[in-house]
Image (tube, rainbow, N blue to C red):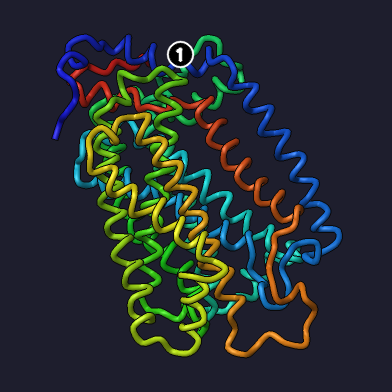
Amino acid sequence: MNDLPKQEETTLSFEKIKKDILHPLQNHKGLELWIVFLVTVIAVCGWAYIVQLRDGLGVTGMRDYVSWGLYIANFVFFVAVSLVGMLISSILGLLRIDWITPISRISEMIAVAFVAVSGLVIIMDMGRPDRVANVIIHGRFQSPILWDITVVTTYLMISLLLLILPMIPDLAICKNELKKASPIMKKIYNVLSLGYINTPSQHKHLHRMIKTLMVLIVPVGLAIHTVTSWLFAATLRNGWDTTIFGPYFVAGAFVAGAAALVMAMYFFRINYKLQDYITDVQFDYMGKLMVAVCLVYLYFNLNEFLVPGYKMKTGDDVHLKELFTGHWAVLFWCSQLLGNVIPIILLLMKKFRKPLPLMLISIFVLASAWIKRYVIVIPTLLHPHLPIQNVPENFVHYFPTGIEIAVTVLSFALALLIITVLAKIFPVVPICEIAEQRGIEVKIED
């Protein structure tokens, strides 16, 4: 399938592709200011984490009943967004879908950033992070937490390889073309390019390794969110006691990841002036992809609530009424309507699959995805089987404290900083793959 505009195939040369894609790496005004802003946010919010580390988790809103708060909701959200790398680069890549070529590297940058920070979020949630090594040293096979750490680490490693290996030809170009790069960056380009000069043998072996990783990451990507869902489902709590949480979480992850990718595509298209590469074609197909994954997610949402609603056991009765018409109704219906139903309706119309409308819709979808994780975590913990009684008032309700919110903001700032730094030192659009796709000869100097 090749829907690339005909005029681009005839007017783009290899020199122009290199110039367009490499130009932002050395001449992007304002990016340094954005980095300074993120570092400032990280410094301020890092102080909040130091306070938590010093005084304990009592500075948060978490208590005996709600022992998982913003942090675990955030962890599930970050793991969800990271699955976009597997969805775009691996599943669609193995299907040889041409239109993903300009956006595959962006998806991998998002995957690396979010899965790396997801591990840090778990450490932020620990009262004694100095004991994190004990999870590995004294971990038990029966513990889903051990499985979670294993698959998160494995997914991060494979995602890093899937980011770097396809980039090797471009890094060889960066080594020769980026004359203004610092000596350190030139050394990094030289080391990571591994002496690549695009010989037939190098090309063959590189693509064989990439394809192997694309196959390997699919079961690992599915496992990372399935195991995360088992942390919830391996209990008898109302709202979590279900057998469909694995595919339910995976479907929701594809929705969140696709929305995050669309937002990043729009930013790089406008700010890096990559309109010739990240075209309306990519946005149109991403809109169609979002409709598909939202429909699957809607199906799982219907299953998730229709079955317990039909049986209406005592515990489920309390939980569902709180979600549908009670204290959590506003958040619940916002997540369902703004993050699922309305986007499906809008994106069926082509005018909403244009870059700006799709980006705005994606903002609501991504925000709703985070709200949905919050609604999955907190209400269930506030609905234990036994009544909450003879405890202080602040045990009965959960409200995130300023410290908790600041530490949560810290995790988002860290993820954005990682993506920003990666986009500052590496081409966000594959140079050689774009040229090969459009029948342009690739020339790499020795």
Q: Position of residue 200 (x, y in %)?
A: 23, 28
Q: Residue at x 57, y 14 (%)?
A: 29
Q: Position of residue 345 (x, y in %)?
A: 27, 48
Q: Let me know if residue 333 appears in the view.
A: yes
Task: Tell me: residue 91, above or below residue 316.
Answer: above
Task: Tell me: residue 210, above or below residue 277.
Answer: below
Residue 8 placement: quadrant:
top left
Q: Residue furthest front?
A: 325
Q: Residues within 10 Å of mark 1 (few under 14, many from 20)?
A: some
Q: Residue at x 47, y 20 (%)?
A: 271
Front position in the image: 209 or 32: 32
Name the quarter where the C terminus is drawn: top left
Name the quarter where the N terminus is drawn: top left
- Residue occupied by mark 1: 23
Task: Tell me: residue 63, above or below residue 29.
Answer: below
In the rendered structure, the answer to whether residue 353 lies left or right of residue 54 reads left
Q: Let me know if residue 107 appears in the view.
A: no
Q: Position of residue 308 (x, y in %)?
A: 38, 81
Front position in the image: 168 or 247: 247
Q: Secondary structure at mark 1?
A: helix
The amino acid at mark 1 is His
In the rendered structure, the answer to whether residue 381 lies left or right of residue 24 reads right
Q: Residue at x 75, y 62 (%)?
A: 60
